[in-house]
Each structure stands twice: as C-alpha cells, then as structure tokens.
C-alpha cells in the first residue's frame, strides 16, 4: 500500500519529519515575506553568503531586496531581551557560485534567540544531529569553537593582514601555505607547531580533543575546549555523538560569530547540508542585548543528493471506454484511492506518462493490463 508520504520528494519527507521534532522542543514557525528593505543587507553584507543581492524600487520609492537570508530578518524583528525558539521554511535568493546565476534556494532552519547558556547550545546541537540522522543514517557533524583559534592568534604580535592570511590557510587546510605565512609573520616555533597540528585534526572527537588540549597555549583556548567537551558529553548521553568531529577549519566572520560553529554532512551529498553556530555579535550590531544560536539546512541539496531508483508520475493509469458512465468511473477512482494510491483516468495512454500499473475499466469492472 502506498501512502501520500511515499509520493513526496526526499526533501519534502525530511521537512515534515524535521517540523515535528522542532515543534516537540517548543519551536514555532516563523513566516516572512519575500522582500526586505535593502539597507538591512547592505549594512551586513559580510554576514551573507554572497554580496550580490537582487534589488528593486517599490512604488513608494524604497529600495527593496529579494531576501538572501532569513536569520537577519529574524534578528531584526526580535524584541530586545526576549527569549524565542523559532523555525522556518523559506526560499532565499542568491547568486550561485557554481552556475553564476541567481537561484531560488529552499532552506529550513531554526534559531534560538536569547539562547545564552550552555544548555541552549546543547539543545541546538542535538537538534542539528537529530536533523542529520533524519536525512541520512550516516552523517558527520563537524564542530569547533571560534574562541580557540582567536585566543591562539591573540598570542601572536602580528598585523590583522597576517592574521587573515593564517586564517585563510587554516580554513583551506593548507600546511605548505601555512608554513610560508607563519614564516612571513615571524611567529614563534611553538605557535607554528600548534597551527600545523590544528589543521591536521581529524577523526575521532575524543582523540582530537586530547590533541587540541596538548597544543593549547593559553586559558582562552582551554576554556573553548572545555565548552566543546561539555557539548560532546551532552550529545553522547543522548547517543548522538557518533558522528561528531572536531574541525577548526570552520570559520565565520568574527564581527558576527562567536563561540560554537558547526557544519553537517551526509552520505551521497558532496557539500555541507547544514551549517550553524552562535552569532551573539550579530545581535549586538542590531542593538539586541540577548545572544542567539541556530542553523540552516539546505533542502535543495537533499533533492540533488538523494535519488529514488525509479520515479513515477502516478501509481495507477486507469483506461476506460465509452461503456463506462461518469458515476461508475468516479466510484472506481474512489475505491482505488482509498489506500493512498494516485490515479490518472484517461481513454488513451498519455505520451510520456510514467505509471506503476495500468488498469482497464469497462462496464464489467476493472481488470489489470500491465505493471511497470
């Protein structure tokens, strides 16, 4: 028996399952329009995935934009000091780096506005892991803490330009470029060793954490690792830590992000399907006193990465002849759809129609013609 959910695309099935778990944790759906005033995005371009934004002037003369991001709008409309759990299913409009054209991208995500404590991080991270497990049995959730690398760079008496170069090398996991950049900045041998070991971290979380503790040079780095360990313990208690990995190549704009950051990956999909982190600094920029943490899921990636082996337009093609009256046809269709199957009724076989099974209806009843 086929159910309505069997006919849904992978991203649609995932969306329904994700909605259920988010609402179980008290998250309520956030809805927004397609347009937002351009100034919001212009002033926070470095927070966006791309600074190419589709704009237009409305009848009142305001410069508007098709939304390239949802989080900015949520933060803009958040009431100062208020604690809110929100999730969304929205389309955003961005320039595709791959195809160099604007695309409408479907996203789903959640935001814990006012989630300032360790519990909030554990809740959001556990929901990220649960989300990935719904998408695929095999997943990886890479996590890091912005404070670890930031505290390491604070140890070095180097320029902002030199820091940016080192960050670039860490992000791209390039040991040769990192060695050159470290030599150019004339940093100490101990700091160079820490950076090289940092980009080599991979695999088992517990072992990677031990390595990270061995290369920590100051209290700020140790504090960041303590927080990561506490989060690992919380997820491990929920049996959600199997896919957790430590990866300090995850980076975001420090004007917006602080603390925990993470990326999620699943089997059969080459890029990240989930990304998130703590972005208290964004709220400060928009004059909101509370902190926040959240993540987004790229639903379009699920559709591209999870392919069903056979795809049908309809479950049943019902061919009927001129001996069948409308009442008999409607009654037959009603009976066939009772078990959740879809029915396409026609007097001929439509060109290009993909069907699971073809039936024939005449005055004597239904008979099976063929199966695909």
Image: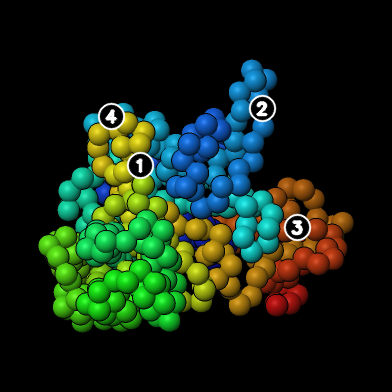
27 in relation to 56, above or below: below
**Residue for point 40% across, 41% down:** 29
- Lateral position of residue 152 relative to residue 14, left or right: left
**Residue for point 64% across, 64% down:** 98
Q: Secondary structure at mark 3?
A: strand
Nearest to viewer (mark 4 / mark 3): 4
**Residue for point 51% across, 72% down:** 269
From the image, tell me which residue sits under label 3.
345
Other residues around mark 3 within 10 Å, as few (<14) / some (14–19) / many (≥20): some
Nearest to viewer (mark 1 / mark 3): 1
Which one is earlier in the sequence, the residue at label 4 or at label 3?
A: 4
Other residues around mark 2 within 10 Å, as few (<14) / some (14–19) / many (≥20): few
Which one is earlier in the sequence, the residue at label 1 or at label 2?
A: 2
Mark sitting on residue 57: 2
Q: Foreground residue, 325 or 242? A: 242
Nearest to viewer (mark 4 / mark 1): 1
Which one is earlier in the sequence, the residue at label 4 or at label 1?
A: 4
Other residues around mark 4 within 10 Å, as few (<14) / some (14–19) / many (≥20): some
Choose top left, top right, bottom left or bottom right for residue 180.
Answer: bottom left
- Is residue 294 in view from this perspective? no
From the top left corner, tell me how far across and down residue 65 is, in percent: 59, 35
174 in relation to 120, above or below: below
From the top left corner, tell me how far across and down residue 146 is, in percent: 29, 59
Quadrant into which the C terminus falls:
bottom right
Which one is earlier in the sequence, the residue at label 3 or at label 2?
A: 2
Real-space CA distance between mark 4 and mark 3, rounded to the nearest whole angstrom: 57 Å
From the image, tell me which residue sits under label 1.
282
The answer to whether marks 4 and 2 mark residues whose Cβ atoms lie closer than 8 Å is no
Q: Foreground residue, 209 or 30? A: 209
């Amino acid at each position: 028996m086929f159910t309505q959910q069997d006919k849904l695309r992978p991203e649609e099935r995932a969306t329904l399952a994700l909605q259920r778990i988010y609402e179980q944790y008290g998250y309520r759906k956030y809805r927004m329009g397609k347009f937002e005033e351009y100034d919001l995005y212009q002033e926070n371009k470095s927070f966006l995935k791309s600074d190419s934004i589709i704009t237009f002037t409305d009848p009142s003369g305001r410069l508007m934009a098709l939304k390239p991001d949802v989080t900015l709008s949520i933060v803009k409309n958040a009431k100062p000091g208020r604690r809110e759990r929100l999730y969304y299913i929205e389309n955003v409009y961005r320039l595709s780096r791959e195809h160099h054209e604007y695309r409408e991208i479907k996203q789903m995500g959640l935001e814990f506005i006012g989630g300032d404590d360790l519990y909030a991080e554990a809740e959001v991270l556990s929901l990220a892991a649960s989300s990935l497990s719904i998408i695929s049995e095999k997943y990886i959730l890479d996590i890091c803490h912005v404070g670890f690398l930031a505290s390491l760079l604070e140890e070095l008496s180097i320029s902002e330009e030199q820091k940016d170069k080192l960050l670039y090398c860490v992000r791209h996991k390039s040991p040769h470029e990192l060695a050159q950049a470290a030599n150019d900045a004339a940093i100490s041998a101990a700091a160079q060793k820490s950076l090289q070991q940092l980009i080599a971290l991979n695999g088992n979380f517990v072992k990677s954490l031990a390595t990270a503790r061995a290369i920590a040079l100051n209290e700020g780095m140790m504090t960041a690792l303590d927080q990561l360990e506490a989060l690992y313990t919380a997820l491990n208690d929920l049996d959600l830590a199997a896919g957790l990995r430590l990866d300090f190549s995850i980076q975001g704009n420090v004007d917006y992000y602080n603390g925990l950051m993470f990326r999620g990956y699943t089997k059969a999909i080459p890029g990240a399907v989930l990304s998130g982190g703590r972005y208290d600094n964004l709220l400060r920029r928009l004059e909101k006193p509370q902190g926040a943490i959240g993540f987004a899921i790229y639903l379009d990636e699920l559709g591209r990465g999870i392919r069903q082996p056979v795809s049908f337009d309809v479950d049943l093609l019902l061919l009927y002849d001129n001996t069948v009256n409308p009442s008999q046809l409607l009654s037959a269709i009603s009976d066939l759809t009772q078990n959740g199957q879809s029915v396409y009724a026609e007097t001929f076989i439509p060109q290009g129609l993909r069907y699971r099974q073809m039936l024939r209806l005449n005055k004597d009843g239904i008979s099976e013609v063929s199966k695909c």
